[in-house]
Image (spheres, rainbow, N blue to C red):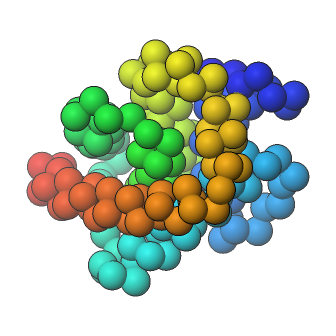
Amino acid sequence: MCSSDSSTTTTRSIVTDYFNWRLTNKTATTTNRLYMIIRSIASDCETKYYSQQPPFYFRVSSSSLIDVQNNHYEIAKELFDDGTITWSRIITFISFSAILAECLMNQQQLNIDFVISSIIDWTTSFIDTDLYTWLESQNYWAGCLKFYEKTTAQRRNSISRYASILGTLSKYILIFQTDV
């Protein structure tokens, strides 16, 4: 989905940027204001979450990548199942997806480039397809930029909500991990 800002930002470019930044130990630089905001919010929230909870892990064999895709989709549906869609939840979902990719990176039997590319595809597809109407009503990613540039209070509130949402997602990981 495209925003109306001058750089035409798509969901795929946002997800890909966050994955690249997160999975390369935060060394990538950018001048894109939206990328910087998403990186900052997600990073602050993960830090807050990890200071209160142990990290979660997800183990999978190469033959069950389809199971990971199915679980990823089920977790996404559950996250938005109550009909509440917010930028905080979308950023949480992007971050969760990157954490999942990071968990799988350490498993040598997997083709990690394929796994990362697949998770980027799944995440982008869910956001663009399942959340399309809401994104359209928000003026796509330009709406996200406008929302978070309003005040730092919005950002602080998002961090608290994000950390609790990430905690909920980690519980789903434990449930699905036993199924894989």
Side of 167 relative to 150 (left or right): left
Side of 102 relative to 143 (left or right): left
Looking at the rendering, which quadrant does residue 60 occupy?
A: bottom left
What x and y, as percent, mark residue 98?
A: 50, 54
In the depicted view, which residue is nearer to us: 103 or 81? 81
Q: Does 116 sit above or below residue 26?
A: above
What x and y, as percent, mark residue 107?
A: 41, 63
Name the residue furthest bottom: 51
Task: Judge whether residue 114 can be spotted in this image.
Answer: no
Residue in the picture at 87% in, 28% down: 6
Which quadrant, please, contains the N terminus? top right
Residue in the picture at 53% in, 19% down: 137
Residue in the picture at 24% in, 58% down: 168
Residue in the picture at 30% in, 78% down: 53
What x and y, as percent, mark residue 51?
A: 40, 83
Task: Judge whether residue 33 can be spotted in this image.
Answer: yes
In the depicted view, which residue is nearer to us: 78 or 140? 140
Looking at the rendering, which quadrant does residue 146 occupy?
A: top right
Q: Does 4 sit above or below residue 75?
A: above
Side of 104 relative to 17 (left or right): left
Q: Does 50 sit above or below residue 122?
A: below
What x and y, as percent, mark residue 175?
A: 13, 55
In the depicted view, which residue is nearer to us: 180 or 135? 135
